[in-house]
Image (cartoon, rainbow, N blue to C red):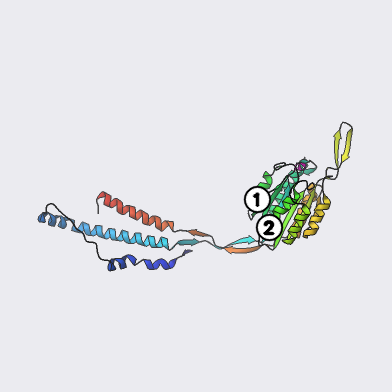
Amino acid sequence: MLRFEWWWLLVLLPLPVLLRLILPAAKQQQQRALRVPFFEQLQQASTAHEGANVSSLRWIVAVLMWCCLVMACMRPQWLGEVVDLPVSGRDLMLGMDISGSMREQDFEVQGRSVARMEAAKVVAKEFVAQREGDRVGLILFGDNAQVQTPLTYDLKTVQHFITESMVGLIGSSTAIGDAIGLAVKRLKERPAESRVLILLTDGANTAGAVTPIDAAKVAKQYGIRIHTIGVGAEQAVVRDIFGTRVVNPSKALDEKSLLEIADITGGKYFRARNTREMIGIYDEINTLEPSVIDSVQQRPLAELYYWPLAASLALSFYLVWRRFRGHD
């Protein structure tokens, strides 16, 4: 549908006529060195018909130019069909540990042994794909925490940066408290009814300026719920020069703190010992934090003012060309 944003500017159409009636005509003074009355009469007789046509053409072009200018000033716009945009109002941040310990290969994906980080990335991407209508962001933390993707409806971008995340990118330590604090800073600005942080780690807080418990208390003040996920197998068989032995690759995991963080903020603590458990955890979080999708109707709008503006400019070039060629 075509509409004009400033339709009232249509009153400008008769402006040139009003100015012509109100303002006095410019005086034309011509000085000639030699007057030849017969030649002037002959020239006027031979060009009378042609001059009338030229004057009419110039008048028509001028009118069209002015109409195009007024139309451009009225801001013509094209309104498309109404579309429904899914919106749930839920803000959800993913906090992913990329410290050195996430290289531990105690997970499996499609029957092959992979590092914890690779399994976490695969499952997190599937989780993000199911959050249509939510604003999702990504925080990575190691020696410190940084926002890799701000809260956005563009889930494909979040998935892309999850794929691009690398172990050790920002150090080998684990700044859990800083990650929570950064999530609080981003989430507290949002006017959402539900603010959620999903924190995934395989260790304990070993770096950062704030402790995880203190950060969790601040999160509670802003109504931010934190679900924590402890990652890592409990048993693994290793071979050395003395043979094989069973070790606990998750001995550095601070489950007590993760459980306390979840309790303080009204969230839940989960333990992911393998890929299957990790998938189940994200499925449960989807149940705990359902993406209740509402829709907002919107009509795409395209500005069209440049078309009449270009037409007016083209007509002005035409008049200049005629004058240059000596037609006027």
**Residue 181 location (% of width, % of height):** 72, 53
User: Can the viewer see residue 288 in this picture?
Assistant: yes
Q: Position of residue 311 (x, y in %)?
A: 38, 56
Residue type at mark 1? Thr
Q: Is residue 283 visible?
A: no
> How dense is the environment of label 2, judged by Cα within 10 Å: few (below 14), some, or many (20 and up)?
many
- Label 1 to label 2: alpha-carbon separation: 13 Å
Q: Residue furthest front?
A: 209
Q: At x 36% / y 62%, what residue is drawn?
A: 67
Q: Position of residue 72 (x, y in %)?
A: 41, 60
Residue on which the image places disc 2: 187
180 or 282: which is nearer to us?
180
Relative to 112, is 308 above or below? Answer: below
Q: In this rendering, is residue 14 above or below 200?
A: below
Residue nearer the viewer, 138 or 106:
138
Instruction: Name which residue lies at 42% across and 68% down.
Output: 8
Image location (x, y in percent) of residue 7:
43, 67
Give the amino acid at mark 2.
Answer: Leu
Instruction: Give the residue at x 35% y 61%.
Output: 66
The residue range painted magenta reads 98-102
